[in-house]
Amino acid sequence: MSAVVCPLCHHRHSLLFCQDKRRHYFQCQQCQLVFADRATLLSSEQELAQYQLHQNDLADQGYRQFLQRLATPLLGMLPDKELDGLDFGCGPGPLLAKMLTEAGHNMAVWDPFFAKDDTALLRQYDFICCSEAIEHFVNPAQEWSLWLRLLKADGILAIMTKRYTSAAAFANWHYKNDPTHVSFFAEDTFAYLARRDGFVLQVVDKDVVLLQRNH
């Protein structure tokens, strides 16, 4: 297959990285994003049907504990005062926003399927959270550019997504088998974005990164 354009950094040199029975996956040679063949994308209706299978209950203590792995390090970086935050891609149960509200912050939510209130995208925020959503972005350059506009000069991006480590591991990785997962990040991908766009990157865990704007 010929090289294809990266949907994150628009570099014109992305090569076949892996293939399975369902899809081909390409790797950008500049930012290292791995992305699924765009010919295999689900329709919006199919995508929504997949999301509706998820059970994200606001009262689920296990789900709360899972999200705490993002919330705790984020809260540790924020100054001790009330701030404005956005839970981007909050899904049908915006528990992360609820947790951060409980911690004393003003939270807005936005999701293309479950909370499409575009007035939330007309102001700036001290921090933006994206938990288990960035891997669903078909054109991540679009959302990333939006975040750059929405984030204040010293703001923080808090992102949770499982990161791939190698081609061998990717080939046997269950995470890629979800048909709604189409963009896969490596640590190097976040490092590239941090260098390019003026962030300090903090790798918190195998699936959590914090990026603080330094200009």
Image (cartoon, rainbow, N blue to C red):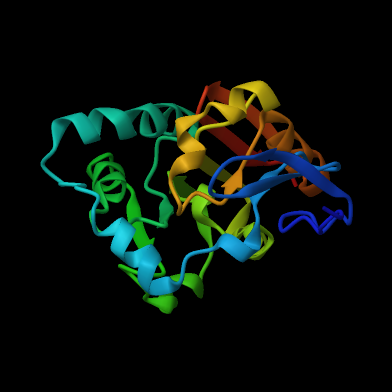
- Asked if residue 45 lies left or right of residue 128, the reply is left
Q: Is residue 169 shown above or below 109?
A: above
Q: Residue at x 49, y 49 (%)?
A: 181
Estimate the x, y position of residue 203 in percent, counting from the top left.
60, 25
* Residue 108 placement: quadrant: bottom left
Q: Is residue 153 rendered to the left or right of residue 120?
A: right
Residue at position x 89%, y 50% in the image:
13
Depth order, front residue of 92/103: 92
Residue shown at the point (60%, 29%) measured from the top left: 170
Q: In the picture shown, does residue 101 fall above or below 108?
A: above
Q: Residue furthest left?
A: 59
Image: 198 above or below 163? below
* Residue 19, quarter of the rendered image: top right
Q: Is residue 60 above or below residue 110?
A: above
Which residue occupies 81% across, 59% down? 5
Q: Nearer the viewer, residue 6 or 112?
A: 6
Mark yes or no: residue 112 visible.
yes
Quadrant of the rendered structure where residue 69 is? top left
Is residue 149 shown to the viewer in this render? no
Percent position of residue 63, x then y: 23, 35
Q: Could you say which is closer to the camera, residue 121 or residue 166?
A: 166
Residue 81 appears at what percent x and percent y?
39, 42
Q: Residue 133's spot in the image, x, y percent? A: 45, 50
